[in-house]
Amino acid sequence: MRLNIISVLFPLVFFKYFTDINIEMIQYMDGIGLRWPLPEIKHMLPIGISFYTFMAIGYTIDVYNEEIKAEKNIGILALFISFFPLILSGPIERAKNMIPQFKSLNAIDFNSLSQGLRFILWGYFMKLVVADRIGIYVDTIFINFQQHNGSTIMFASFLYPFQLYTDLGGYSLIAIGVSKVLGISVMHNFNRPFFASSMSEFWRRWHISLISWLTDYLYTPLSFYFRSYKVWGIVIALMITFIISGIWHGAAMTFVVWGLLQGVFLSIEALSNNSKNEIEKKYNLKKRIWYNILGITITFVLFAVSQIFGRSNNLEMAVNILTRIFSTSGALFIGPPSNFIYIIVGLLMVLLKDFADEYYPSKFQLFDNSNKIIRIFSFSLIFITILIIGVFDGGQFIYFQF
Amino acid sequence: MEKTEIVNKLTFVFRKIFNNNSLIISNELTANDVEGWDSLTHMLLVSEVENTFSIKFKLKDLNKMKNVGDMVEIISSKF
């Protein structure tokens, strides 16, 4: 099994980190007067390499753990690893869910076709209308952050998590929808993350397929290994898991700090869990609306702060951004008013839908309304909105780089 | 060890870890049914069970524990 995992991981490590390490080595060797014998290799990252590598590793470990039987049909296995809707950016699926579906494919039925198309429509709305609109604003601010005041940078930093959510969340929905159209059910990747009232709950709602993969294949073995240290063993396992997750996002110190921060947030929660529960029970806090809003706000702010490191080019930039937020003030930079209004309207629509799904799951249905006219009206409205205010310049999708 | 004895001992462990003195466990009980039973507290539970019964689990055992009933089976197989 180890040999298999190493051979599967090798291309990922090579393509992701070789160029960085090689450039470092060339500079270092030049510095001490030596020529590095390997030529500088600059290559493109093979598309989707992280995602099929993760699926292949998951499959190997599941077979080793006797969770599933080894698949004898190489065609089915190849289809699982390279299933086209998921290959670019996930969701990172499991063999246990996918392989049986590939084996019992039915003729395409109307219900899954229609459900799939709804996912695709809402996914495109999230991606083209909301994420890419926010992207225009956030990029403007972050690229020239020295020219902007604290309130503007803070606003952009709070918008960035929404960009990430609608970007990957929207993309995932398109992938899930395309699979559904083909009759294949794929796991959901986001579960209204911004209504989480603690960091641990947040990570059960955000990029679920990656986090559950990391939990099963990295965190669980690590915490099992360190279990004799009790709660401190969990802290060690959390830190290692999130630092590795950070380095996977990019071979840069900013991502190490990003991972470190997540590890610290979750560790503090794990360490204070018992006393927090007691206080919550004593004052019946979980039923209070203000307490939940407080939890949701703190969770969001902590995540947004950690993402300043994820978004910055280097640590210096992240620290400067944080300093500017607290040291300068002024009026909020709006930019082109139409873009700003589109952001607010688009984001409100996404958040209102999530709010309704979270707290009133069977009320206020638009896409699934029993009234045909309301259904058709909402499809058309979203479709036209995409056409009118969607961003169609072929802008990059953030997760392609991973 | 008798299974009823294992369940009795387990009940104490569960009540201690999840801080709930009225918790009653059954074979079908899963992490979804117990407040606070997540991937963080799970390992505290596993380690407490090991100490209580003086046994050692393997990582493979862990993957097979889908509910309390599985856990009881695996514990009883260690004696």
Image: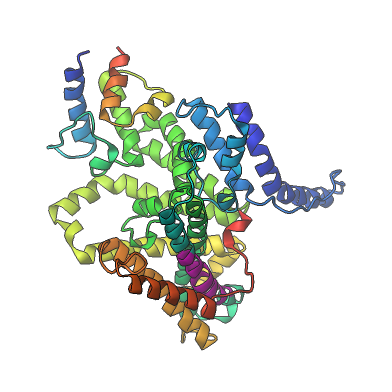
Residue A398 found in image quarter: bottom right
Image quadrant assignment for residue A354: bottom left
Total labels: the figure holds 0
Residue A224 visible here: yes
Q: Residue at x 14, y 56 (%)?
A: A284
Q: Residue A215, position in %: x, y? A: 44, 41
Q: Nearer the viewer, residue A122 or A342?
A: A122
Residue A16 picture location, percent across and down: 67, 48
Residue A166 magenta-highlighted: no
The colouring scheme, among rainbow, by chain, secondary structure or one colour, is rainbow
| Residue at screen point 40% across, 61% down | A302
Q: Which residue is drawn at 24% across and 51% down?
A: A276
Q: Which residue is drawn at 52% across and 54% down?
A: A257
Q: Nearer the viewer, residue A359 or A378?
A: A378
Residue A184 is left or right of residue A368, and the answer is: right
Residue A130 within the segment the image draws in magenta: yes
Residue B56: where, in percent of width, then height? 36, 20
Percent of width and height locating residue A27: 79, 52
Report the span colored magenta: A121-139
Query: Do we see residue A297 in this rendering?
Result: no
Quarter of the picture containing the N terminus of chain A is top right
Q: Camera-side residue: A154 or B14?
A: B14
> Which secondary structure class fits the magenta region best?
helix
Q: In this view, does A332 lie to the left or right of A8?
A: left
